[in-house]
């Protein structure tokens, strides 16, 4: 169990108890109440009270994203917490039957779990758009739809969405103009709710080789300084985390005399901590508590803005090229997407990302390009208000989602990932990594999901 210094309370996700609970979450009591009907989107920079108020709400929602602890929240929350989005999160989240335990130790998440038995079991995945869509896309079934039966080429039409309780809603969709060639099907929801316009789903967009590459980069290059991670606020810049895991190293505090720079590393990895009086942290534990890293322009979670004064590298060229290519269906004919920042989210077995909006980019007409890697997840796409019931869908390794236009203003989140062998849906990724002998990556990704979302900030 994690016993390190208290992390930035605004960092990352709340982790599972067995995952170490390394990321603290802010207490629901200390955060401002959520207005029952959040105001619609205002243009960035409007600087109104509404906007500030909403940002404070998001400040709490986005980075903490606590799913464990939800039971606590529910008890302490008022009606404003009982929104359709919140209800859906509860339907889809992972429940465990385990003895109730509450940790209040400093530096750990305050989590409660095991109060309820499993409702969303790994064998009963949600009825969702993707249930319908993937019947047609992935398995080639005729399905109750006007979708062409073979993936990746399909025709515009209507799909039926099963909702809980057996009702079926039609979803009108069109195939998006890919523009850049490539053998992908792009599903663009256009009428389920007006606000879904601008949401594009590109199943199987990344080959297994590409998936391996992005998994490896996410674990090796992307957390390297000057990129910041949830660990930066605690340890300062730390280098070569994944290499340290491979070599079973431990993280130790650097003696004062070793620090010469203005922003010196405060910790570094060493072979073993023998002979040192300070505390040491196994590299593997640090990796397991990695929740996010930021590429390109660095996002300041505490101020909720992009801090252009922070040292940063440009988005890696290959990632930038990929994002430009994938963004095409959501861009106007003459424009090119300009990747300026990316957030890499690392999900452990019981992690989730609470419902939120991404509203800190200046131009919301530009898409967010979001890559899924590793274990399958449930993604909730809500409306402009938390009261709008979200659509649930699966995102698998290699899928890409674009959020643009109206959908850019919609609440969304990830209440659940599937880490069991049967439901994680990572067979090809696993066999590719095993063939290549990349066992450390394999071990990590078998119980994890990585999301890379790429943004144009200005
Ligand atoms: O993990 C995902 O698929 C979504 C991530 C996301 O919405 C975000 O980082 O803002
Ligand atoms: Fe998001």
Image: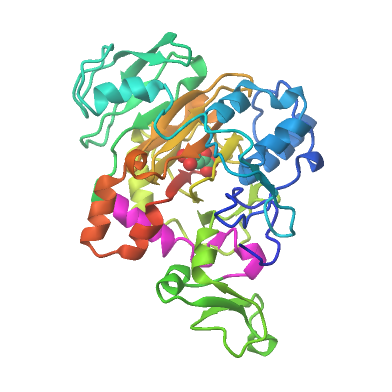
Q: Residue at x 52, y 33 (%)?
A: 118
Residue 347 lies, in percent from the top left, at: 49, 48
Q: What residue is at 23 percent from the left and 53 percent from the top?
A: 431
Q: Nearer the viewer, residue 215 or 299?
A: 215
Q: Which residues are magenta?
A: 211-237
Residue 230 lies in the magenta-colored region: yes
Is 88 part of what is drawn in magenta?
no
Where's the N terminus, which quadrant?
Answer: bottom right
Q: Is residue 107 left or right of residue 149?
A: right
Residue 180 at x, y = what percent? 26, 36
Quarter location, residue 232: bottom right
Question: Is residue 60 something one can see in this rendering?
Answer: yes
What residue do we see at 77% from left, 26% from top? 78
Percent x, y of residue 239: 50, 72
Q: Quadrant of the C terminus?
A: top right
User: Which of the two residues, 127 or 253, is positioned nearer the viewer here?
Assistant: 127
């Amino acid at each position: 169990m994690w016993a390190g210094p208290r992390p930035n309370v605004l960092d990352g996700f709340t982790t599972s108890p067995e995952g170490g609970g390394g990321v603290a979450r802010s207490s629901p009591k200390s955060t401002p109440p959520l207005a029952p009907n959040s105001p619609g989107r205002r243009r960035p920079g409007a600087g109104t009270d509404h906007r500030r108020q909403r940002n404070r709400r998001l400040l709490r929602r986005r980075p903490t994203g606590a799913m464990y602890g939800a039971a606590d929240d529910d008890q302490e929350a008022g009606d404003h917490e009982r929104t359709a989005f919140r209800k859906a999160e509860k339907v889809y989240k992972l429940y465990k039957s385990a003895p109730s335990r509450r940790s209040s130790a400093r530096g750990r998440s305050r989590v409660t779990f095991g109060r309820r038995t499993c409702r969303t079991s790994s064998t009963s995945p949600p009825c969702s758009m993707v249930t319908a869509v993937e019947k047609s896309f992935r398995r080639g079934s005729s399905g109750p739809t006007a979708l062409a039966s073979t993936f990746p080429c399909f025709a515009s039409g209507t799909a039926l969405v099963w909702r809980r309780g057996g009702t079926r809603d039609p979803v009108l969709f069109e195939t998006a103009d890919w523009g850049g060639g490539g053998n992908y099907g792009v599903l663009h929801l256009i009428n389920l709710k007006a606000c879904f316009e601008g949401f594009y789903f590109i199943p199987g967009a990344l080959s297994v080789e590409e998936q391996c590459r992005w998994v490896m980069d996410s674990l090796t290059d992307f957390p390297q300084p000057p990129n910041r991670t949830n660990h930066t606020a605690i340890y300062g810049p730390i280098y070569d985390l994944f290499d340290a895991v491979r070599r079973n190293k431990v993280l130790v505090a650097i003696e004062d005399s070793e620090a010469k720079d203005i922003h010196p590393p405060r910790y570094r990895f060493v072979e073993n901590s023998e002979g040192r009086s300070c505390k040491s942290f196994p590299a593997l534990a640090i990796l397991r508590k990695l929740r996010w890293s930021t590429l390109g322009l660095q996002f300041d979670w505490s101020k909720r803005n992009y801090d252009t004064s922070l040292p940063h590298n440009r988005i890696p060229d290959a990632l930038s090229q990929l994002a430009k290519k994938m963004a095409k269906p959501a861009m106007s004919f003459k424009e090119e997407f300009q990747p300026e920042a990316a957030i890499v989210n690392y999900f452990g077995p019981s992690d989730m990302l609470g419902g939120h909006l991404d509203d800190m980019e200046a131009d919301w007409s530009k898409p967010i390009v979001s890559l899924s890697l590793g274990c399958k997840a449930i993604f909730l796409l809500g409306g402009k208000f938390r009261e709008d019931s979200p659509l649930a869908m699966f995102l698998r390794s290699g899928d890409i989602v674009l959020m643009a236009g109206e959908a850019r203003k919609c609440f969304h989140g990830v209440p659940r990932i599937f880490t069991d062998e049967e439901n994680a849906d990572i067979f090809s990724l696993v066999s590719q990594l095993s063939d290549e002998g990349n066992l450390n990556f394999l071990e990590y990704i078998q119980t994890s999901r990585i999301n890379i979302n790429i943004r144009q900030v200005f």
